Image (spheres, helix red, strand yellow):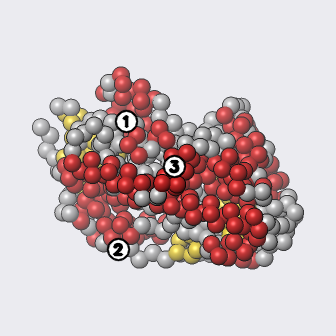
Amino acid sequence: MSEKKYDAIIIGGGHNGLVCANILAKKNKKVLVCEARENCGGMVNHEIINYVPSIPNSVSQSIGGLNLKYNSKSTIALSESGKHIRLIGNQHLDHATIAKFSTQDADRYLEFHDKMSQFSKALGKFMLDSPPRIMNNSFSDYAKLFKLGLNVRMLGKKRFNEFARMIGLNIADELEDNFESTLLQGLIAHDSVLGSNLGPRSPGSLINLLYRMAVHGYSLFGGIYEMDGGSETFISALLDKCSKNNVEIKTSAVVKQCLIEDDMAVGVELNNGEKFFAKTVVSNADPRSTYLCLLGAQNLDTDVKRKINHHRSKGRVAKLSLQLNKMPEFNDCDDTDLNSRMVISPSIDYIEENFNPSKFDKLSSEPVLEICLKKDSNNNSSLDIQVQYAPYKVNGGWENIKNDYVNSIVKIISKYSSNIESCIENKTFITPDDIEQNYHVSGGHWHHGEIQIDQLFMLRPIPGAAQYKTHLDGLYLCGAGAHPGGGMHGISGKNAAKVVLGDL
Ligand SMILES: Cc1cc2nc3c(=O)[nH]c(=O)nc-3n(C[C@H](O)[C@H](O)[C@H](O)COP(=O)(O)OP(=O)(O)OC[C@H]3O[C@@H](n4cnc5c(N)ncnc54)[C@H](O)[C@@H]3O)c2cc1C
């Protein structure tokens, strides 16, 4: 047997890997993090992230508390007519805002919000622990299943039936049943599909919204923040903890493979041939890379190989950053609006028409946009834009199409901001394909894998690996591809650490 110097080696220093590392180290485990990039943080990087949820207390407390400050952000759905909808996540004020357009929509919005918030709470409570193993005959798994059932049952008979009816539905039907404002429909539909490979008419788009709400304080338009100092402040805080907890970190350390002895993970080998041994190996890499590259297809049985090959993780969000030489003016918007989360998603049909070509790896010239005004420490401003749906691979190759596509995005923005072109100093555009290359995430997917009913909870990322343990003893998952999913919150890292500690 090889000498095991570490209790745990974490492959990847994304925020989930760092959360996991800290929790293990706080329990006096000897931990090594191997990160492929020059710096830790993974996709929690200013060029990727726009808005974030607050880090849950349970995550923060498990690593000894974090002193992070947030600026709450309101959302504005831009309309070409200038009749924008501004929502802040306060039900009373949002009701009054929507009532200016339609009193019926305003009343229905409160009902819809209340219902969705309750549903997201029922599911959300379940996110903060590892999902139960079905058919495991263990008391704790039965207890978890019972708790989930109880959470849903506690909704009451009417809501329970409604929950059962809605859970696999598409969001478009629900929004069209409730609201007459196409702009409001478009805005909520946008948040239901952001980061996913679903259109608003795709079954399952509703559950995507429930996931988002569960992460953002069970709210549709509340719980959306910019972190003071930028999202990388979170990474600095985690690295600070790592140094206090004696976590060893190697950067520019690409793990080539997981080392296996007697059907157990025993360590890692880097690209440069260095080997490190540990009692457990925890992967912050996405499930596809973990299984097919780090573990290796040759070490998977046919059934597992089939499951991981079917795992859906093709990203659909690209990122455009427009560096500005002066502030753009948006029609009928003031400075507060410019500092809000600006969304260009005028209707459900607009999104769906945009989604359709992406199914065939083609581009729509009218993508859906979430725009964020950022200022760096030198007071340079940029508009950072989440662009959906940008296929992972595009017909004709991204390199040949990128410029035209970027120009078409700027053209869309100019419908809302007539001087935008004159404000642009420089543009950078990264596709899901670039994200795959630069951030080592296969498919460049927001969540390391779709948030859909067959890839959620007890099935995330694939059946048999939903409790953070992979099919190889001693190898665990701790990233966004594991339960509950992506976004900057660290829940997967925290949940995984608990499971690893139980086995160490
Ligand atoms: C375009 C886009 C926009 C997004 N915008 C937002 C947003 O506005 N708000 C938000 O909350 N979320 C956003 N997300 C999602 C969020 O960034 C991710 O869900 C989150 O960062 C995942 O964190 P993680 O720690 O699980 O994985 P990652 O951040 O992917 O970290 C994994 C780490 O593992 C490393 N790694 C992988 N393979 C190896 C290897 N073989 N050897 C060594 N190291 C390895 C990688 O280099 C990386 O550092 C966005 C995602 C995308 C793609």
Instruction: Look at discs 3 and 2 and give the one toward the viewer.
Output: 3
Graded by Cα atoms within 10 Å as few (under 14), some (14 to 19) or many (20 or more), the crowding at tag 3 reads few
Q: Name the residue under label 2.
A: 65
326 in relation to 314, above or below: below
Residue 463's disc number: 1
Which quarter of the picture shows residue 83? Answer: bottom right
Left or right of residue 208, residue 483 in this image: left
Q: Which residue is drawn at 76% across and 52% down?
A: 347
The residue closer to the viewer here, 20 or 7, is 20
The percent position of residue 471, horizontal first and vertical second, equals 29, 35
The percent position of residue 499, horizontal first and vertical second, equals 26, 51
As helix, strand or loop, the secondary structure at mark 2 comes to loop
Q: Can see residue 251?
A: no
Q: Can see residue 473?
A: yes
Left or right of residue 77, residue 279 in this image: left
The percent position of residue 325, horizontal first and vertical second, equals 76, 69
CA gap between label 2 and label 1 equals: 34 Å
**Mark 2 belongs to which amino acid?**
Gly
Which quarter of the picture shows residue 379? Answer: bottom right
Left or right of residue 36, residue 248 in this image: left
CA gap between label 1 and label 3 equals: 27 Å
Instruction: Look at discs 2 and 1 and give the one toward the viewer.
Output: 1
328 in relation to 274, above or below: below
CA gap between label 3 and label 2 equals: 40 Å
Q: Name the residue under label 3.
A: 161
Q: Earlier in the sequence, mark 1 or mark 3?
A: 3
198 in relation to 332, above or below: above
Instruction: Look at discs 1 and 3 and give the one toward the viewer.
Output: 3
